[in-house]
Image (cartoon, helix red, strand yellow):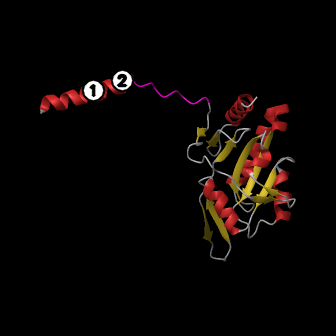
Amino acid sequence: MWKRNIYFLLLVASLTACSEPDMPSPYHAADVTWQHSKANFHLTDFNGKSRSLEDFSGKVVILFFGYTHCPEVCPTTLADLAQVMHLLGKNADRVQVLFITLDPERDSPELLSQFVPSFDHAFLGLYGDAQATAQAAKAFGVSYEKQFNKNGSYTLDHSDGTYLIGIKGRPLLLSPYQQKTEFLVQDINMLLSVGR
């Protein structure tokens, strides 16, 4: 019996040794394509136009979920993305930054149209009703929850990563909050070159 167990362990060890090692990802951001293979949204931009991911085919999409009353994470991320667009130079024309509000109760189209482009004129803000917002967040694995204050107002605790989506809708990468701008630029340029 023990000989059979030793033989089995040796067989498993030899098979493991023969398998190909995982290749490191060429991207700084994590590839989450497998996790969100059917991720999409059906929302409205602040100009009143219905939008989904397919509308931006041919461009790298940078997607961030947040809200305009956010005290730190959202404005910091949008400021960083404005810097990324500047560093991309001519390639910025082939990139679309989308800000999806998680707070449709307060983030009206008018407010989004003032807040989002204040970071970069090409940035686009998207909104939906509570159900459409929840569906978009769920599709991308974004969590959010209201935290009420004593005065009755609230903030939102929410996921803070930024999605980078290739020009054909794949791959889908997730970049952490406060990722170095040069890393974002490198990943975006790689997504642009892969799609050529």
Location of residue 41 in the rendering, given as x and y in whole percent from the top left corner? 70, 55
Please, what is the three-letter code of the amino acid marked with disc 2? Ala
Viewer-closest of 125 and 165:
165
Viewer-closest of 56 and 93:
56
The label on residue 17 is: 2
Location of residue 34 in the rendering, given as x and y in whole percent from the top left corner? 56, 43
Tell me the mark number nearer the camera, choosing from 2 and 1: 1
The rendered magenta stretch, by its main secondary structure, is classed as loop
| Residue ID at (63%, 49%) | 38
Q: Residue furthest left?
A: 1
Task: Report the quarter where the C terminus lies.
Answer: top right
Which numbered disc, 2 or 1, marks the residue that appears first in the sequence?
A: 1
Q: How crowded is mark 2: few (under 14 residues within 10 Å), some or many (20 or more)?
A: few
Viewer-closest of 84 and 57:
57
Asked whether the beta carbons under mark 2 and mark 1 sit within 8 Å of each other, the answer is: no
Please tell me whether mark 2 sits on a helix, a strand or a loop.
helix
| Residue ID at (67%, 45%) | 163
| Residue ID at (70%, 42%) | 169
Mark 2–mark 1 Cα distance, whole angstroms, equals: 10 Å
Q: Residues within 10 Å of mark 1 (few under 14, many from 20)?
A: few
Magenta stretch, residue numbers: 17-26
**Which residue is label 1 attached to?**
11
Residue 158, placed above or below residue 1: below
Please, what is the three-letter code of the amino acid marked with disc 1? Leu
The label on residue 77 is: none
Magenta region includes residue 75: no
Q: Quadrant of residue 12?
A: top left
